[in-house]
Image: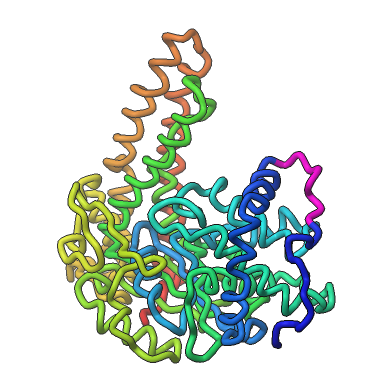
Amino acid sequence: MRPRGDHFDMMNMPIDFDANTDEILQRALSLYRHERDPIQALESEKSEMLRHLDVPGMNTAVAICFWGRSGSYLLASYLDGHEDIVTLPMIAGEKIYPFFEEYASLSLWEKLIAYPTYSGLKKGVEAAFFEGDFAIASADYYAAIHALFAVFRDCPATWLGARLRFFQFLHAAYALATGVRSRSGRPIMIYAQHWPNDALAQRFVEDFPTARFIHTIRDPISSFDSWYERSLEMQLYSAGRGSDTPSHYLSSAVECVRHLCRWDRAHDGMEARTRAIRFEDLHLAPEMTMRRLVNWLGIPYLPCLIESTWHRIPYVVKVRGVDVCGPNPANAQRRWKNLFFADRLLIFALMHDNFVAWNYPIPTWIRARWIRLGVTVLCLLVPMKMELINARLVLRLQAWPSLRRGRIRFFCGAPIFLLTRRLRMMLLIAAEAYARLTGRRTPLTML
């Protein structure tokens, strides 16, 4: 479709949430109206760029999911610079489906105005469009929306209101805002689902029948070790930003094991369209890994695929106090500081099929099924190191401070909670061991 020839002041497009008391909508509206003059100055530029983009034809999308801390950000950042790909920075696309459902009554126009504010407020700077190290100019984004509606505003309401359309227009607006020009006019859209979720995956496939899933994976020993730290970090942050009187105890050890035992396989029914990429390969063999990936996706390999960027800006992270951008071989070594020797044996036994399928080193003597069963039975009786760390933190940071504040009931509940968590961990490991030893768990297939 080509832009309409008649002039239409997009600033007069209706926004029906003017009187809405929703803080997110009011912030979005205020920001949009503040940019009136810069938006109008950019409209012709964005309209010209849109002539080279077939928005309704953007029907190829790929979701990236993680298995703990396994390089999902790094993988997406490698894809950022490819001219046949458009990807929102960091986790800016993670809330697409929750937002669409929460604000279902808004028009497509209104959704596009509101989403950047919603994303940033819900998920923080890593999901922000207009702030942080990888910010885009809000005027560029809004001018891109104007260009889109100069072409599509008179399309049927049912067509504009489709969930698929919001996904397409959001990515098209970002591409126009950043100046991305696709050779084909139909770039692949990268969806940062990150958290494995069957319901979200199903919605994604309903919108994009040819959708594919890439799961980043990691050496299971390292993954349990690092994901425990991340789980604890998130729970401590959540407890700390509330009040000095937490309403629930820390449970990071059980959550870590539960998550990793659940996320090591494809979403239900998505096995044929799902592949896994190893964290270590992203660091040790990035070019070979990315060549395999783009071959699977059907697009050409370009040298930018081993450059880690967002919005074409280098993605720099701190690793043990050192700034790193892109491959970091030192980060690919096996780690286990939060695991006892018995914990590692348990992981070898429990995740045996993962080690084999994903080509990670594992002791040869533990390959016999009866040995794995015996190791699991013995090790599940002994608390894991992460459980002991969690217990000390519950007592030191939550139970004792609560006693000093007179919260006797909360203090007395801590030992009972820790006991139930130990029993919960034992039941979880036993159930997973049974399922895995009987072949009822199929690990992700490598790319």
Residue in the picture at 28% in, 76% down: 306
The x, y position of residue 151, in whole percent, is 72, 79
The residue nearer to you, when weighing 360 against 433, is 360
Q: Is residue 336 above or below residue 174?
A: above
The x, y position of residue 275, in whole percent, is 42, 78
Quadrant location of the N terminus in the rendered image:
bottom right
Q: How many marks?
A: 0
Residue in the picture at 49% in, 66% down: 88
Q: Is residue 335 above or below residue 416?
A: below
Q: Is residue 342 above or below residue 58?
A: above
The residue nearer to you, when weighing 160 against 104, is 160
Residue in the picture at 45% in, 57% down: 135
Residue in the picture at 52% in, 64% down: 193
Left or right? Give the position of 426 relative to 307. right
* Residue 241 lies in the magenta stretch: no
Residue 199: in sight, yes or no?
Answer: no
Q: Which image quadrant for residue 7?
A: bottom right
* Residue 21 lies in the magenta stretch: yes
Q: Main secondary structure of the magenta part?
A: loop
Furthest-left residue in view?
A: 330
Left or right? Give the position of 166 relative to 21. left
Magenta range is 15-22
Left or right? Give the position of 19 relative to 259. right
Describe the colour scheme in one phrase. rainbow
Quadrant location of the C terminus in the rendered image:
bottom left
The x, y position of residue 190, in whole percent, is 49, 73
The x, y position of residue 149, in whole percent, is 72, 73
Q: Which image quadrant for residue 323?
A: bottom left
Residue 247: in sight, yes or no?
Answer: yes
